[in-house]
Image: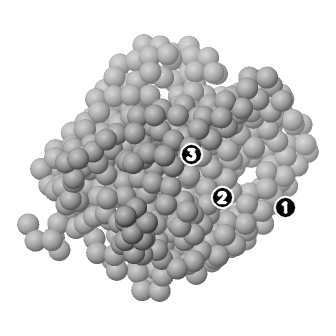
Amino acid sequence: MKKDNYKWVALSCTTIGALFSVLSGSTLMIALPVIMKDLNASMGIVTWILMGYMLAMTILVPSIGRIADMFGRKKLYVSGFALFTFASFLCSISKTGIQLLIFRMIQAIGGSLMVANSTAIVADAFPKKELGKALGINSMIISIASIIGPILGGFLISIGWRSIFYINIPIGIIGTLWAAFQLKETATISKKHKFDFKGTLTFSFGMLALLVALSFGGFIGWVNITVISLIIVSIILLVLFVYIENNTDEPMLDLRLLKTRVLAFAYTSNLLNGIARGAVTFLLIFFFQGVKGIDPIVAGMLLAPLAVSMMIVSPISGYLSDKYGARILSSLGLLISAVGLLGMMFITENTSTFEIIIWMLIMGFGSGMFFSPNTSSIMGMVPADKRGIAAGLRTMANNAGNVLSIAISMAIVSSSISQEAMQALFVGTQVGSKGIAVDQFVLGLRTAFTISFIFSIIAAVISYLRGKEPDWEEELEEELEKAQ
């Protein structure tokens, strides 16, 4: 197979994987009320079916990225596809909420194997000057999946919630076989490796403690002894992790990725953008259902404008970043997102759905301008043997931002809504403002959007302040000279 043909084959494999995982998540979101009732599951279990998957992905992806850099990407990607498919079958036969939660965690392992390798596979296959275009196409497909998911979920619920997992099985089998037969191991893999178990364990448990603390903080309060204890444990473990990585020959995370200004600023803007945007859909679902009294499925569909504008802009911004660089496009994208959030800051009980759609379109436009160029900037400037961990760190930063965003929003919104009403709105079993102090609730939403706006502006400044691209070969030569 010619190299020029292979790059499109590789993109097709990763695009099917992205479509697969995003569709699975967005259809499940719509089905949660039905699942909760049918399996007689508690609110805690339902919350963890959602949050647990995100937490597991955030923790696992960087470690898997490092393993992929050491042993190759194809085997891990194909294994992830197969495991995700098998876990979908297990989810479809779940008899209790606990079973579904366990099988979702298995899905998260499969999803992590796919996500950690998909961006690196594309970066390996495409020349640097075309990487933005390829990642833009990938983002476009993810946006399409975000639009289709709620609509497909609403249709599948009428057949039965288990059909949401049944539909994954044929797609997963096709995707697994296509990747197994078509992907090639293009990166050069060295045979001499030593896996950093100490670093991986301290990182994984440190991130787990931090993310669980952030998740629970919004629900049970930030001064709760459990939350405070988890934050202290996470700080100790992550400081120990940095010490281990600085004193290990083959670290899990090459800290040069974070010491290099352009990469550090690209990752930081990605994290801040996650904090700015992570809770937006979450908050709008609350607004549509709790204030406007809109049906849960229709409320889910009303979020489509965010994904539509992202779908249109992502491939264009990716193409432009290949020609003109990522710095201006990424920074401008974050400023445009901030304009959308600025509009949301003035939301009231009487704000029309049409006006909210306009602000969503602007936010989606800005996000589409940011994601493809910023990802291309990260993946295009790291050497081939670090693309796995680079992609993993990018995903981790984005997911950690999303978790923190939801935690902050939960803390703000919970002060204006009864616990029962919050739980009912969260899983879509309540429509309307019963149990909600509407004026306080809207004020809480406005406060949350104000915080998101501030983070988006900071992210834009950080993105603009990135420096020149690093010369990794030059740095390596300098290190060798110092060692001699």
Q: Measure the C-alpha gap from mark 3 to mark 1.
A: 42 Å
Query: Is 341 situated above or below 401?
Result: below
Residue placed most toward the observer, 97 or 217:
217
Structural crowding at the residue carrying mark 1, measured as other residues with C-alpha within 10 Å and reported as few (<14), some (14–19) or many (≥20): some
Question: What residue occupies the far left of the structure in this picture?
Answer: 1
Q: Which mark is residue 242?
A: 3
Q: Measure the C-alpha gap from mark 2 to mark 1.
A: 22 Å
List x then y, in percent, for residue 106. 39, 28
* Type of amino acid under label 2: Leu
Which residue does the numbered mark 2 point to in the structure image? 272
Which of marks 1 and 2 precedes in the sequence? 2
* Type of amino acid under label 1: Phe
Structural crowding at the residue carrying mark 2, measured as other residues with C-alpha within 10 Å and reported as few (<14), some (14–19) or many (≥20): many
List x then y, in percent, for residue 431. 71, 35
Structural crowding at the residue carrying mark 3, measured as other residues with C-alpha within 10 Å and reported as few (<14), some (14–19) or many (≥20): some
Q: In the image, 11: left or right of 266?
A: left
The N terminus sits in image quarter: bottom left
Q: Secondary structure at mark 2?
A: helix
The C terminus sits in image quarter: bottom left
List x then y, in percent, for residue 301. 56, 50
Q: Secondary structure at mark 3?
A: helix
Q: Measure the C-alpha gap from mark 2 to mark 3.
A: 21 Å
Q: Which mark is residue 346?
A: 1
Disc number lying in front (3 or 1): 3
